[in-house]
Structure formats: C-alpha cells, structure tokens
C-alpha cells in the first residue's frame, strides 16, 4: 500500500543505483604489498571499494591506504584531505599524496581489521578530474580511529586501473578482503 502511494505521488521509487560486483581480492598467507584492479570497464556511473584490511608491519596504529589510478605514481598529481578522531583527540590535515582511506596497523592486535567504503565518483568522465570520498575506521579493544577522507586525482583520463598499497609499504595482512563494485547511473 505504501509503495503504491509513493509510486503515485513520486513516480518510480525502484532503486536507481544498483551495485554490481566487478572483482574481489582476499589476501592469501604471506600477505600482499599491492591489491590491484585492472581492465575496469567504463560502463558504470561510479565505483565503490569495500574492504576489511590490516597491515603486516610498519605503522603502530593506523596506516593510510594509497589509492593510485592508471599506474600514476607521481604524488604531485594527487591531493588528499582527512578528518579523523579517536577517543583521545581529533585530526584534520591535507597532503599532496594519494591517501584515500586507512587500515589497521601492526601495533594493534592481529585480530583487528579496519573497515571502509571508498567511493570513486564519475571515474569514466573525461571532462573532469576524478574525486574520491571515503569513510573508514576500526576498534582496538575500546580504542581506535574513524576517518573521513577525500582524494583528487588531477587527471581527466578514465580510470581503468586501481592500485591500493599501504603508506608504510607493509603488506596487507592475510585474510584482508578488498572488493570493487560498479554503481549504475
């Protein structure tokens, strides 16, 4: 009944942003330095990455995730902003780096993995630069972080490849899972 009323009053109320799984990577024993998605089709409006991940070493608590497009490793081609907080304080800063989200560092217990969602907006639009927004965080036995971040890739090329590495250069820990989805327009 409510659906019929809404449909009559507001037109079509069916979901307009269907998600389709493109690829999922689960890190095997021994870890992985980079997770890559290649040959990304240009048939979606947006992309989304969902992850549960931690690193093998390096950072004591949080370890930012570098999100690079089309094998572009020039840091000057990226801008990032982040707002974050923990139980003991807040952080707001910006970088000339491709920082898009965060993972749990090795200083926390091996059972704690960070969770996050990264939206890559209008990735196939060649008339503007690619923008990214993300929300990530984790708990570590009552402590932890939550991060809201944005990234700009100053390039108008359609995104066909995504590489995710950790800021510390440490491997993603075994059982880390990173999935790429396409969002229809």
Image (cartoon, rainbow, N blue to C red):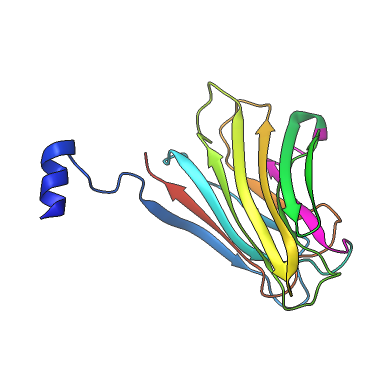
Estimate the x, y position of residue 37 in percent, counting from the top left. 60, 53
Residue 1 is one of the magenta-drawn residues: no
Residue 74 visible in image? no
User: Position of 4 compared to 162: left or right?
Assistant: left
* Image coordinates for residue 135, horizontal then vertical, percent: 61, 50
Q: Residue furthest front?
A: 88
Q: Is residue 103 visible?
A: yes
Image coords of residue 172 (percent x, y): 75, 65
- In this view, 106 is above or below 102: below
Residue 139 rendering spot, x and y as whole percentages: 70, 68
Q: Residue at x 40, y 53 (%)?
A: 19
Q: Residue reaching furthest top?
A: 127
Q: Quadrant of residue 12?
A: top left
In the image, residue 62 lies in the stretch drawn in magenta: yes
The quarter of the picture where residue 157 lies is: top right
Q: Is residue 172 above or below residue 101?
A: below
Q: Residue at x 14, y 43 (%)?
A: 7
User: Which quadrant, please, contains the N terminus?
Assistant: bottom left
Report the side of 165 relative to 155 (left or right).
Answer: right
- Residues in magenta? 59-75
Quick one: 47 or 94, which is closer to the camera?
A: 94
Q: Which sits in the foreground, 23 or 108?
A: 108
166 w.r.t. 172: above or below: above
The residue that appears at 53% across and 36% down in the rendered structure is 123
User: Which quadrant of the rendered structure holds the C terminus?
Assistant: top left
């Amino acid at each position: 009944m409510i659906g019929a009323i809404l449909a009559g009053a507001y037109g079509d109320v069916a979901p307009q942003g269907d998600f389709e799984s493109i690829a999922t990577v689960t890190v095997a024993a021994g870890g992985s330095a980079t997770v890559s998605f290649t040959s990304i089709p240009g048939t979606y409006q947006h992309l989304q990455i969902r992850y549960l991940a931690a690193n093998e070493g390096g950072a004591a608590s949080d370890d930012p995730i570098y999100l690079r497009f089309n094998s572009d490793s020039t840091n000057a081609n990226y801008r990032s902003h982040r707002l974050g907080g923990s139980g003991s304080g807040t952080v707001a800063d910006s970088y000339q780096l491709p920082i898009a989200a965060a993972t749990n560092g090795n200083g926390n217990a091996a059972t704690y993995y960070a969770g996050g969602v990264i939206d890559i907006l209008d990735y196939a639009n060649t008339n503007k630069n690619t923008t990214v927004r993300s929300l990530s965080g984790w708990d570590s036995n009552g402590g932890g972080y939550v991060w809201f971040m944005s990234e700009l890739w100053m390039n108008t090329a359609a995104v066909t490849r995504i590489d995710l590495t950790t800021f510390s250069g440490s491997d993603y820990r075994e059982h880390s899972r990173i999935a790429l989805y396409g969002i229809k327009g």
